[in-house]
Each structure stands twice: as C-alpha cells, then as structure tokens.
C-alpha cells in the first residue's frame, strides 16, 4: 500500500543554506517496504511554512511570501498545483525574539513584512482562518464557492507574558472546534480564546478566554472527538495541558499539565507539534532542542496523561510530524538537519521505533498525512 504525506517548509536560503526546496511536496510511503520511496513537487510556492487542506474539493490553504517582500495566504488547487487565489498583508514591519538552534543563541528577528504562522479552513462555509505571530492578530478571509478570497477581517490581540519570547501576544493557532466555534492560542500572552463565527461575513464574536500558567506559551492544540478534552501544547514550558471544553457555554477549564522532556533536562527546548492518535489513546509531541518525540498515554477517558516513551529523532530541530493513514507509521521532519525520519508505530502500545533514517528533504517544517485527500 502507498500512503501519502504533504510536505512544506521554507524555500528561502535565509533559513537553510543552498536550500533546494521549491514549495509543497508529496512524499510516498510504501507501507510494505516501510520506507519513503518518492518525494515529488506538487505546487511551486514561496515559503509554504504551514498549510491545511479543505475537507472537500482538493484545495490547500497555505501561508506564503512573494519576492521576499510580502507575506500572506493563498488557496492552491491540489490537482493542478496552481494558485487559485491569494491575499497579501500590508507591508508592516515585524520583529520578534527568536532562537537559533545551530548557534544556541537568541536573536532579534527583523522582517520587512509579516506572514501568518497558522492557517485552517471551514470548507462548508468557505472561510479561511489565519493566526499571525508577528503582528499579534487573527485574520479571517471569506471565500466564494470557487475558493477565491473576497473579503478579510483582522482582530488584533493585546498582551504579553513573563519570558523573553512573550513581548507581545504572538498568536500561533486558529482552528474550529468540533462544535463550530473558533479556538485561538496566544503564545505570548498565555491565553486561549474562544469565538463564535458569523458564517455570512467571517466576522468573530468573543465568547471566552482562559488564562494559562505564566510562561506556558500555548502553541497548538490537539482536539479529541470522543470527549470534550483539548490537549494544549506549551512551546515555552515544554509541557502539554489537558483542558476541558464545555460546548454548551464555550467555556474552558484547566485540568492538569505534563512535561514533554525528561526531568532534569537543562538545555534549551521548544515543543513544536502535537498529534492525537485516531483511537485517541495516545498523544505525540515533538521537541526542538531535546530533539525528541514524547509519547503520552491518554487515561481516565481523556482527563489524564502519562508519558510512556521519549525517543530521539536522530536529527536537529524536529518541527512537525504526522501519523500515517492507518496510524502504523509516524513521519517527522528534522528542520535544521534537512531530513525526515520514519518511525514504526505499535498501535496497541503506542510505542515508536525507527523504520527509516536520513530521508533527504530541505527545510521541512510541515508534515501532513494526505492519502485520501490526494486520491
């Protein structure tokens, strides 16, 4: 059987010297051979560092840049690889505190433009949501039936936290909850926000906000569908929080949190991505710095976690990863060593073991299972 993944990342040499990446790629996994056998270009896009597909119509919403001068979002046709529609943000200067893993130091990242960090789609109502880390805002984009962007709204968020990376609100995630509300992560202000969405014009109305622990740095969320629990990844704290969501009121409640790195680890780390297995029994987290994946078992009907494995990714700065269609494999991107690593996954125990090492692919920061999407 051939499983497929979408790969995205940076195409600029400023992120990876002699970068050979040209956009969004398709990686083919031969599940019998237990190896990635082919990686081919799907769409030529400048710096598609994050994207998400539509649920119907084979369209991809992506962030992108243009001529290293502007940043914005675009809709891509996954069949032809062509851009359907694009929208660029005003050329507002963006700057923020960042970490250079290669040199083990913080630096002030100055950008002549701003680009979102996260995008997602409400396919049914033709709305694209974007989280903007650089300008601390949520963007919504209304689209027509052909996925052409017709209107946009911007919602700035104020706030900050106690750490150097938290000088501003730094919005990093915006995605629909199962009940249709939008949930947003404020990494810099240590808050989660819930909004009602107007389907006609893509406007937002605040419903609730939850203050996380200081310095937690909420980056991404894995959502359970068999319960009302959310698993919130804290990039800065290197922890994952269990949050209970009440769909009747839209309110959130803190339950507990758990470490993604070994006790006593003193080096720099930033947890990067989070995934829940299809049976919702195991939760996976990537760690940039410790260069590992943490495996948590989900207990008490989703309310509690227990870390059962910590496995090295055998590369530098593992950013994103994805489980295969049948949850038998996990493909992870080591951004700064320009390679992928494929793990076997035991569905009964949740444990990972290496299947294939050193799969060459430059500056990859987005990995997404897409077998059915591309069929």
Image (cartoon, helix red, strand yellow):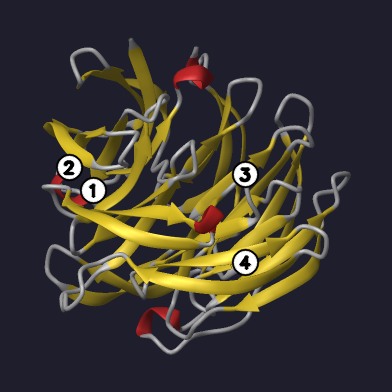
Rendering coords of residue 349 (x, y %): 30, 41
Q: Is residue 150 left or right of residue 2?
A: right
Residue labelled with disc 3:
225
Mark 4 and mark 1 lie on one chain; the one further toward the N terminus is 4
Name which residue lies at 42% across and 82% down.
215
Residue labelled with disc 2:
338
Residue labelled with disc 4:
137
Between label 1 and label 3, give the one nearer the viewer.
Answer: 3
Circles 1 and 2: CB atoms closer than 8 Å: yes
Rounded to the nearest angstrom, the CA distance separating label 2 from label 4 is 31 Å
Rendering coords of residue 327 (x, y %): 38, 30
Q: Is residue 195 above or below residue 127?
A: below
Residue labelled with disc 1:
335
Secondary-structure class at tag 1? helix
Mark 3 and mark 2 lie on one chain; the one further toward the N terminus is 3
Which residue is farthest right? 200
Q: Nearer the viewer, residue 36 or 104?
A: 36
Name which residue lies at 51% across and 80% down.
168
Circles 2 and 4: CB atoms closer than 8 Å: no
Rounded to the nearest angstrom, the CA distance separating label 4 from label 1 is 26 Å
Rounded to the nearest angstrom, the CA distance separating label 3 from label 2 is 34 Å
- Would you call the spot at circle 2 few (<14 residues within 10 Å), some (14-19), or many (20 or more)? many
Q: Is residue 283 left or right of residue 342?
A: right
Q: Nearer the viewer, residue 241 or 299?
A: 299
- Would you call the spot at circle 4 few (<14 residues within 10 Å), some (14-19), or many (20 or more)? many
């Amino acid at each position: 059987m051939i499983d497929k993944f979408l790969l995205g990342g940076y195409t600029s040499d400023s992120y990876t010297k002699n970068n050979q990446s040209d956009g969004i790629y398709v990686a083919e996994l031969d599940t019998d051979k237990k190896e990635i056998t082919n990686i081919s270009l799907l769409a030529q896009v400048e710096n598609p560092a994050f994207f998400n597909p539509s649920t119907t119509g084979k369209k991809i919403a992506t962030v992108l840049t243009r001529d290293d001068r502007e940043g914005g979002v675009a809709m891509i046709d996954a069949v032809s690889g062509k851009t359907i529609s694009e929208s660029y943000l005003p050329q507002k200067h963006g700057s923020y505190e960042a970490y250079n893993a290669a040199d083990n130091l913080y630096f002030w990242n100055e950008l002549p433009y701003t680009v979102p960090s996260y995008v997602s789609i409400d396919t049914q109502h033709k709305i694209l949501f974007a989280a903007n880390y650089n300008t601390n805002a949520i963007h919504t984009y209304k689209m027509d039936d052909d996925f052409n962007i017709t209107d946009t709204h911007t919602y700035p968020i104020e706030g900050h936290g106690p750490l150097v990376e938290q000088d501003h609100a730094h919005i990093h995630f915006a995605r629909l909850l199962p009940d249709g509300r939008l949930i947003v992560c404020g990494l810099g202000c240590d808050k989660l926000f819930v909004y009602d969405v107007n389907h006609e014009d893509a406007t937002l109305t605040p419903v609730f906000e939850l203050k996380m622990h200081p310095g937690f740095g909420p980056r991404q969320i894995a959502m359970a569908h068999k319960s009302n629990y959310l698993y919130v990844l804290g990039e800065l704290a290197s922890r994952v929080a269990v949050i209970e969501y009440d769909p009747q009121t839209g309110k959130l409640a803190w339950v507990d949190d758990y470490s993604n790195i070994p006790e006593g680890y003193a080096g720099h780390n930033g947890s990067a991505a989070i995934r829940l297995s299809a049976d919702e029994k195991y939760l996976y987290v990537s760690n940039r710095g410790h260069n590992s994946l943490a495996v948590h078992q989900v207990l008490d009907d989703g309310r509690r976690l227990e870390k059962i494995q910590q496995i090295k990714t055998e590369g530098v700065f593992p950013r994103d990863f994805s489980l295969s269609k049948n949850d038998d494999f996990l493909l992870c991107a080591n951004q700064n060593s320009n390679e992928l690593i494929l793990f076997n996954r035991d569905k009964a125990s949740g444990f990972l073991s290496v299947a294939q090492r050193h799969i060459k692919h430059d500056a990859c920061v987005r990995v997404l299972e897409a077998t059915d999407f591309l069929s």
